[in-house]
Image: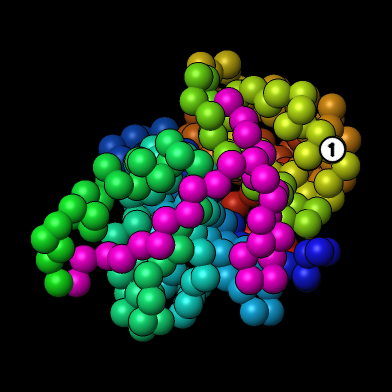
Amino acid sequence: MAAPTLTITFLGTGTSSGVPMVACPCHVCTSPDQHDKRLRSSILVQSATTTIVVDTTPDFRQQMLTHQIKTIDAVLITHPHKDHIGGLDDTRAFQYFQQQPTSIYGNSFSIEGVKKELPYAFEGPLYPGVPSFDLHEIDLEPFIIGDIPVIPIMVWHHKLQVYGYRFGDFVYITDANNIDESEKQKIRDCKIFVVNALRYEQHISHYSMPEAIAVAQELNVEQTYFTHVSHQLGRHVEVNAKLPETMQLAYDNLQLVL
């Protein structure tokens, strides 16, 4: 099944601390440029009939209000770190208005992480009004949500297996510092490749900017956007000026149609 026309919205493009980081006086955190205001990393994937959120960050409520999202069909989890699932409780509003549980998709580690993050939603007796979830444990087999085909991609976040996702010609990878060759085949020749680039210096569990550029060039993608950016990388305009023509920093509220 070919993917329908998709609109991708970057709900957030910052690392776990966001940008600006609390209490930081650096030139990035004090920048007046709105491109340097980064909520925690998440995207919205929408067709004409289906809405998917990839990761519910601690900024999830603000992100949903900003984009006036009225319904969601599913949440895809990349991994269960706090900056990627910290907003799950705020899905309660969608459950109230849609009168159904929120469908959550993730690998076994992510599903267990959701249960640990919100034990009050799974351990009885359940208090009235707690969030309600329909949990779907996935592996690397493709699946479909509504009319949107999804291909999971396993990447390494140091020693942790994290899932990226491919939607048609769009690939989203966050929190990675290595990708097995078998999984790289799922990314090659896509039109849009989104990958984390934390800073210029090496990091134990994230791609540095030089490493992220090298991966994008190896995979022969048409256009690359870098996300999960820290204040250590530099100001948006300064970083973009140094990047190859087919690469640029993503920024909050950026929308792509493909």
Q: Disc 1 on helix, strand or loop?
A: loop
**Dominant secondary structure (helix, strand or loop) of the stretch shown in magenta:** strand
Q: Residue at x 72, y 55 (%)?
A: 167
Q: State the residue at coordinates (58%, 26%).
A: 156
Q: Is residue 128 magenta?
A: no
- Residue 193 appears in the figure: yes
Q: Is residue 91 found left or right of 255 in the rendered image?
A: left
Q: Which residues are magenta?
A: 129-156
Q: Quadrant of the C terminus?
A: bottom right
Q: Quadrant of residue 113?
A: top left
Asked whether 134 falls inside the magenta stretch, the response is yes
Q: Circle 1 is placed at which residue position?
A: 188
Residue 39 in view (yes/no): no
Q: Nearer the viewer, residue 256 or 144?
A: 144
Nearer to the camera, 47 or 58: 47
Indicate left or right for 220 with 209 as reference.
right
Rendered location of residue 193, percent (x, y): 74, 44
Q: State the residue in front, 252 or 217.
A: 217
Seen at 27% across and 42% down, the residue is 116
Place residue 140 in its image quadrant.
Answer: top right
Instruction: Please name the residue shown 48% across and 35% down the image.
Output: 231
Give the left or right position of residue 122, taking residue 138 as reference. Answer: left
Q: What is the three-letter code of the residue carrying label 1? A: Arg
The image shows residue 194 at horizontal and vertical percentages of 68, 44
Q: Position of residue 22 (x, y in %)?
A: 30, 40
Q: Tag 1: Cα neighbours inside 10 Å, few (<14), some, or many (≥20)?
A: some
Q: Quadrant of the N terminus?
A: bottom right
The reply, left or right, for residue 30 in relation to residue 239 is left
Relative to 12, residue 49 above or below: below
